[in-house]
Amino acid sequence: MALIAFDHVNIRTARLNAMVAWYGEVLGLHPGPRPPFGFPGAWLYLGEQALVHLVGVDAPPAGRDPGLEHFAMRAKGLAEFLDRVDRLGVPVELAEVPGIGVLQVNIHDPDGNHIHIDFDATERELPDAD
């Protein structure tokens, strides 16, 4: 067996509608086709890929340290993304990964799940406006 790609992340939430809205507004993911499971949920797509699977639950998952600390995505358009999260009031923390040229924009969804969006660190070096 050889792995060929990352497929999706599955998140349980008691705030399904808020999470669908947040992932759409902040990350540009859109709801799409989902099998007719016997429980509520939504599949959120990046293009044709169902990247985030949300599962509706009655109560938030128990407050314990998660085994999954974060998930990450790569992106282009740092300035546009920072403008969007600022406009939406989403707190961010920037962190440059030493030695590999990656700038992480760390954010948290409404349930507190940690996500970082990775940009090429050169995008931080914006051209001077003359």
Image: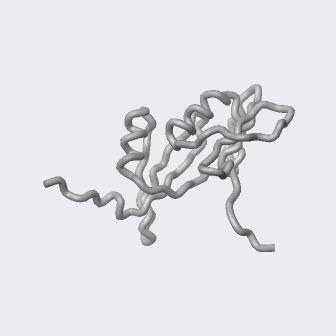
Depth check, front residue: 23 or 70:
23
Residue 101 falls in which quadrant of the image?
A: bottom left
As drawn, which residue projects farthest toward the right? 38
Residue 62 visible (yes or no): no
Count of numbered circles on the image: 0
Quadrant housing the C terminus: bottom left
Q: From the viewer's perspective, tell me whether residue 49 is left or right of residue 122.
A: right
Depth check, front residue: 73 or 68:
73
Residue at 45% across, 70% down: 100
Residue at 69% across, 33% down: 13
Q: From the viewer's perspective, tell me whether residue 97 is left or right of residue 52.
A: left
* For residue 111, above or below residue 68: above
Residue 82 visible (yes or no): yes
Residue at 53% across, 41% down: 108
Where does the image place residue 54, in percent across and percent down from the top left? 70, 39
Where does the image place residue 49, in percent across and percent down from the top left? 66, 52
Quadrant housing the N terminus: bottom right
Where does the image place residue 2, in percent across and percent down from the top left? 76, 73
Where does the image place residue 34, in percent across and percent down from the top left? 76, 40
Q: From the viewer's perspective, tell me whether residue 86 is left or right of residue 56.
A: left
As drawn, which residue projects farthest toward the left? 130
* For residue 38, above or below residue 52: above
